[in-house]
Amino acid sequence: MYRFFFLIISFSLLFSVLKAEIVNEIIISGNKRVSQETVKIYGEIKINQDYKERDLNLILNNLYQTNFFEDVKISLSNGILRIVLKEYPSINQLIIIGEKSKKYKEQIKKVIYTKEKGSLIKSRLSNDIELIESLYSSLGYNVAKAEAKLKKIDESNFDLLIEIDRGAQTKISNISFLGNNSVRSMRLRNVIASEEDKFWKVISKNTVLSENLINLDIRLLTNYYKSIGFYNVKVNSNLAELRENSKVDLQYSIDEGKRFSINKISTNVDPVYDNKLFFPLEKTYKKYIGEYYSPFKIKKILEELDELIDDNNLQFVEHNVKEEIDGNSINITFNIYEGEKTVVERINILGNRITNEDVIRGELILDEGDPFTKLNLDKSIAEIKARNIFRKVNSNVKDGSENNFKIIDIVVEEQPTGEVSAGAGVGTSGGTFTIGVKENNWLGEGKTVGFDLQVDEESLAGTLKFINPNYDFLGNSINYSISSEGNDKPDQGYENTIIAASIGTSFEQYRDVRVSLGLGASYDDLRTVGSASDSLKKQSGEYTDLTARYGISYDKRNRVFNPTGGSIINFSQKLPLYADKAAISNTLSSSTYKSFSENIVGAGKFYFSAINGLGSDDVRLSNRKNLSTRRLRGFEKSKVGPVDGNDHIGGNYAAAVNFETNLPNLLPENYDTDISLFLDFGSVWGVDYDSTIDESTDIRSSTGIAANWMSPIGPLSFVLSETISKADTDKAQGFSFQIGTTF
């Protein structure tokens, strides 16, 4: 009996839940700011429609999700749907107090959930305050405080006041490393972006502690350790307690792990391709086997692989890399396979508010209608990034109108492209000052306009440069420059004023081979000083030159800055098209780098330059060759070679050979000093006009120690040298120093 009644009640309840009721009338109340029509639209409410319990719950959920209403009540009876609402108060104004920066105010308004003219949801305000303080922390204001206050206008309207006290930026007092058993701390300081706060770094942003900068440092340290074989390295950051002067000590803890070498490298080629096409890779494989693992070596192989694909005109080729740990070594397999055969239907350029679209499209290797390959897309993105006018460049590949069509979105984020730089230095040979202004995206056309000014004790020089990377000359950029220079060189017997202009281009001709071409014109007003010899005084006058130049560079260095291996060879020649004193100038230089250990790198450098007058013309004073103190240390600048009376006039030829290696463990790390040992050889010789002048080809040589010290007053460079051989007329310089920085 009881079971019978239980079943009746259960079926009755189920029927009441499932029972649908037609809505004939909708009554909405409590809404003041939000119209009834808006409520119906957001709630998806329709008249003359059946509504069940779940439909009413859906309406309830829809209305709450609008964030317009603090409370919603819904009932349905006798065909009447009643909705009783309680609106959130409205924010009339959002006022930020205590922050003067318009940029920061905009960032705050962008990051918080609460918006002007939006709903005031008090539960969200505490979260917004956390977001604001987190924003300031990312900018280096780690003690910043924010507070939200409400100013009542009426029952349903408030002004929201956010008070900001950002405090002082947290500066990095000291950077240290823990656990770096294989690499010196000084080397790691050169790897990271963060810098210790020193008074000469007042403009540097990298002295300010921020979460973004720490994360960048961790990535840089991780990548560096992996590049020298520490495959599983782990890096963490530690901060000391913030001091009263808003400074903090930053420490990176490093778990180096094992160091892995490369055991085996192999290629797995899809049968659709001829395996023999990829045999040239075997030579590179043999070179790397047994060496320490490095992602850069993998990248180098992938670059060679991509070049083989291009050289053999293979399309729709895909590849990936498989790495397997085997004890203390790694086995690497390059998988080459046929990818999806697709075509580029359309390329969209997005995010360029300033930059002309043609500038971006001009860097694309892919074009609409071309076969789509990830390789060419990646190369296109790399070419756009190389313009250095965008903060970010991303791509998004979408399906096109047909199965084998692809639509590519190239999304760029522009960055400030203006640069201001300045530098100053003082040394035993005098002082220097430089200043430069440059814009890398002039008028949004990707062009570079720059001005440089350099002043020292002997000269004043200014150069205006214009580079147009979009000029389609052999598919490469073209550059223009105008310069003016004034020199006062009494120790060389003359003073002069030069006005010059040039136009040129450069391009990659073959793999690792770059060619440059150019034309130049100059006006030289040369005036000899009263103490000059009669032979020199004959050179006084005004000279006009029109020259053509070309250069060839073969670069096999492992990296451009601070290379640890490889070599580079440069040759250039300048030919006269028209000249009052015609001459041909040739320059050959080369540098070779070799790493003997992780901290010891040796370098050998060669330099030769020659200028020869045509016919009976002498080479004029302002064009003669000299050796700088960088190429021949231990001697004063331009005080080596032929002498006319008391004037060092330079020569037709100049040559130098340099050997140098760093000495990593000579001083404790806390001295922040790099020390290197050098051996220099050089000579300047050759005079056209007077055989009585001493133009000996005797080789000058010197040896010594060079030190670069990051001192409390700025970077200092010292050279302590001893001449091994010299001419009687040469002026030696046993000690020299340079102080200064660029910012």
Image (cartoon, rainbow, N blue to C red):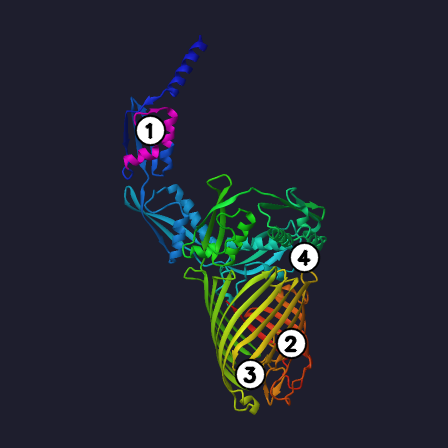
Residue type beneath disc 2: Ala
**Cα distance between the residues tagged 4 and 2:** 39 Å
Q: Which residues are magenta?
A: 35-60
Report how many numbered discs are placed on residues in the image: 4
Residue 680 image position (x, y, % from top left):
67, 75
In terms of sequence position, does the residue under pointer 3 or pointer 1 come before the other?
A: 1
Q: Nearer the viewer, mark 3 or mark 2?
A: 3
On the question of residue 733 being in view, the answer is yes
Q: Which mark is residue 620?
A: 3
> Which residue was labeled with disc 4?
182
Q: Is residue 671 left or right of residue 202?
A: right
Q: Residue at x 49, y 48 (%)?
A: 395
**Cα distance between the residues tagged 4 and 3:** 55 Å
Nearest to the observer: residue 570 or residue 114: 570
Dot 2 lies on which element? Answer: strand
Residue 118 image position (x, y, % from top left):
34, 44
**Which of the 4 quarters of the picture holds residue 674?**
bottom right
Q: Is residue 84 left or right of residue 501?
A: left
Up/down of 551 relative to 393, above or below: below
Q: Nearer the viewer, mark 3 or mark 1?
A: 3
**Cα distance between the residues tagged 1 and 4:** 70 Å
> Which residue was labeled with disc 2?
655
Residue 705 image position (x, y, % from top left):
66, 73
**Cα distance between the residues tagged 2 and 1:** 93 Å
Q: Nearer the viewer, mark 2 or mark 1?
A: 2
Residue type beneath disc 1: Ile
> Which residue was labeled with disc 1?
74
In terms of sequence position, does the residue under pointer 3 or pointer 2 come before the other?
A: 3
Nearest to the observer: residue 623 or residue 71: 623
On the question of residue 560 being in view, the answer is no
Residue 469 image position (x, y, % from top left):
48, 62
